Image: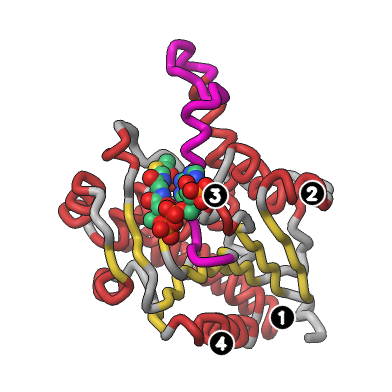
């Protein structure tokens, strides 16, 4: 993914969603210093997500204070997320595809709820337990890192429902597991247990269920220990690496390093 593409969806500053909007979206938001925690909060529906959830996520992304460096996404109750709320399909709120432009705009707006998680200035972590199905799996894939409880199960259910995964998940899935495995996972819509997810690179860490929060906290602490400017520059570099030639990537490394050298050793270096 090129740097330009990563930055493209970067939203304008906005006001954060209020309690009522968060409740309608089925979300909780807690910001503690440099760490924001977003909790999918419809446990009685296994954190099934509505269009309001995705719009709410986009709103959180747009209004994230600059001091936030790490965002943790987690689910309340037994599961991370059972994906789209199946009532959405019967509620008539979704486009039927007859107006392609309107459907394109509609889906693009929902994708905004996921795209901001790639921003270089933040590192995003999905803390996954129980089920991560469909849009829930894609939300985990939208994050930079996935910490899975040993009871986690990932499933790309969309093709089994006659749909395609359209919440930004196909690209990271292929980048992580490769085309043949991505094809197999999507077209069988099978469950991928935590241990296999770790083997495939879908989860960076697998931990006993009762130690998930502790594992996430440890990772957050390690991430926050790194210089913020160096972290953002390195994430930018790594994100563009797959799409660059070696020459382009070397040039990008030089550009980023010049910025770092100015900050670390230059006259205008920050006091911190
Ligand atoms: N949409 C709406 N309601 C849901 C969803 C969902 N996606 N998933 C679960 N629920 C509801 C159930 O209907 C049930 O409601 P009820 O208590 O009124 O009967 C409640 O949540 C609990 O669900 P159970 O099935 O009883 O919970 P269990 O832990 O046994 O199973 C599981 C969890 C595996 C997630 C199961 O609920 C399931 O398969 N859900 C559907 C998953 C799905 O197909 N999602 C769409 C993917 S495609 C996409 O995201 C675009």
Pair 2/3: label in front: 2
Question: Horizontally, is 269 left or right of 245 in the view?
Answer: right
Residue 20 position in % (x across, y down): 81, 47
Q: CA distance from mark 3 to mark 1?
A: 37 Å
Residue under label 2, please give it: 17
Pair 1/4: label in front: 4
Q: Is mark 1 within 8 Å of ligand 1?
A: no
- Start and end of the magenta stretch? 77-102
- Assign a secondary structure to mark 1: loop
Residue under label 3, please give it: 114
Tag 3 and tag 4, C-beta contact below 8 Å: no
Classify 10 Å Cα crowding around label 2: few (below 14), some (14-19), many (20 and above).
some
Q: Of the residues under marks 1 and 2, which one precedes in the sequence?
A: 2
Question: Which residue is located at x 38 percent, y 69 percent?
Answer: 152
Q: Of the residues under marks 3 and 1, which one precedes in the sequence?
A: 3
Q: CA distance from mark 1 to mark 4?
A: 39 Å
Residue 159 position in % (x across, y down): 28, 39
Position above or below: 236 against 10: below
Q: Of the residues under marks 1 and 4, which one precedes in the sequence?
A: 4
Classify 10 Å Cα crowding around label 4: few (below 14), some (14-19), many (20 and above).
few
Q: Which mark is residue 266?
A: 1
Q: Of the residues under marks 2 and 4, which one precedes in the sequence?
A: 2
Observer able to see residue 96: yes
Q: Of the residues under marks 2 and 3, which one precedes in the sequence?
A: 2
């Amino acid at each position: 993914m090129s740097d330009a593409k990563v930055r493209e969806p970067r939203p304008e500053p906005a006001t954060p969603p209020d309690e009522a909007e968060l409740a309608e979206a089925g979300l909780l938001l807690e910001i503690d210093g440099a760490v924001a925690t977003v909790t999918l909060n419809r446990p009685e529906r296994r954190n099934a997500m509505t269009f309001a959830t995705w719009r709410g996520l986009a709103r959180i992304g747009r209004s994230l204070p600059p001091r936030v460096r790490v965002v943790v996404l987690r689910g309340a109750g037994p599961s991370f997320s059972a994906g789209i709320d199946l009532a959405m399909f019967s509620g008539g709120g979704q486009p039927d595809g007859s107006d392609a432009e309107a459907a394109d705009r509609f889906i693009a707006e929902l994708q905004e709820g996921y795209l901001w998680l790639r921003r270089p200035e933040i590192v995003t972590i999905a803390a996954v337990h129980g089920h991560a199905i469909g849009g829930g799996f894609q939300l985990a894939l939208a994050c930079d890192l996935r910490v899975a409880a040993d009871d986690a199960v990932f499933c790309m259910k969309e093709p089994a429902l006659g749909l395609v995964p359209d919440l930004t998940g196909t690209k990271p899935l292929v980048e992580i597991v490769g085309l043949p495995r991505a094809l197999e996972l999507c077209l069988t819509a099978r469950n991928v247990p935590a241990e296999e997810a770790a083997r495939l690179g879908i989860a960076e860490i697998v931990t006993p269920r009762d130690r998930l929060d502790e594992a996430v906290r440890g990772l957050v602490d390690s991430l926050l220990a790194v210089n913020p400017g160096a972290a953002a520059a390195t994430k930018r570099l790594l994100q563009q690496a797959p799409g660059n030639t070696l020459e382009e990537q070397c040039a990008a490394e030089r550009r980023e390093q010049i910025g770092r050298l100015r900050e670390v050793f230059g006259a205008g270096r920050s006091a911190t």
